[in-house]
Image (cartoon, rainbow, N blue to C red):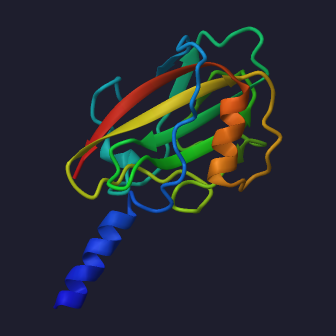
Amino acid sequence: MRLLLWAAVLVSTAACGGDQSGKEPAVTAPDSITVTSTAFRDGEAIPRKYTCDGEGVPPPLAWTDIPANARALAVVVDDPDAPRGTFTHWILLDLEPAPAQLTEGGVLPGVKQAKNSGGKNGYYGPCPPSGTHHYRFTVYALSGPTGLFDGAGLDEALKAIDAKTIARGRITALYSR
C-alpha cells in the first residue's frame, strides 16, 4: 500500500515537476504586446479542454502591438507555482510576426517547438498537482529568428529568446485540481 501511495505522489508531482531548470527568460524589454484568447480572459480559469484533465490542446491565442522591427516571435507557456520551481509547458520558436494568432490546437507549419520541462516537444496542458496555479502565456517579439532546431533544449531555447527579445506581452490563466 505504501508503494502505491508513493507512486501516486511521484506521478502527481511529475505533472509539474519534471526538469525545472528552465526559468522564464530574464527579459528587460517592454511589456507592450497585448495577448488575448477567445477561450479565457486574463486572470480567469482556463477551460478544462485545454488542460491535462481534458483534451490537452493549446488554446487559441491572439496578439497585437508587435513592434514593426520584430523579425520573429516566440511563445512560452509556464507555471511559476509548480512545486519545484517554474515548469515550462510549451515553447514555440521562430513564428512569423503575421498572422497574429494561433488557432486552437494549432501549430503553424514551419514553427519549431523546443522541449518543455517534461522533456518532450509540444504543449503540455495545465496539470497542477494540487491547488490553484497560474499559467502564463507569453508572446515575445524577437529581433530575429533564434535559429534553433525543432526539439531544441529548454534552457537553450529560453536563452535564445532572452537574447533576442525586443518586446513581450502576456495573458495569465488559472487552473485548479
Residue 109 falls in which quadrant of the image?
Answer: top right
Residue 35 point in image, percent of width and height? 50, 20
The residue drawn where x is 80% and y is 32% is 145
The residue drawn where x is 30% and y is 53% is 128
- Quarter of the picture containing the N terminus is bottom left
Q: Is residue 158 above or below residue 38?
A: below
The residue drawn where x is 61% and y is 17% is 29
Q: Is residue 143 above or below residue 46?
A: above
Residue 132 point in image, percent of width and height? 23, 44
Q: Is residue 117 visible?
A: yes
Residue 26 point in image, percent of width and height? 56, 31
Residue 112 point in image, percent of width and height? 73, 46
User: How many discs mark residues in the rendered view?
Assistant: 0
The residue drawn where x is 43% and y is 34% is 136
Q: Residue furthest left?
A: 1
Would residue 72 be found to the left or right of residue 11 on screen? right
Q: Is residue 149 above or below residue 11?
A: above
Residue 2 falls in which quadrant of the image?
Answer: bottom left
Residue 107 falls in which quadrant of the image?
Answer: top right
Q: Is residue 133 above or below residue 33?
A: below
Q: Is residue 38 visible?
A: no
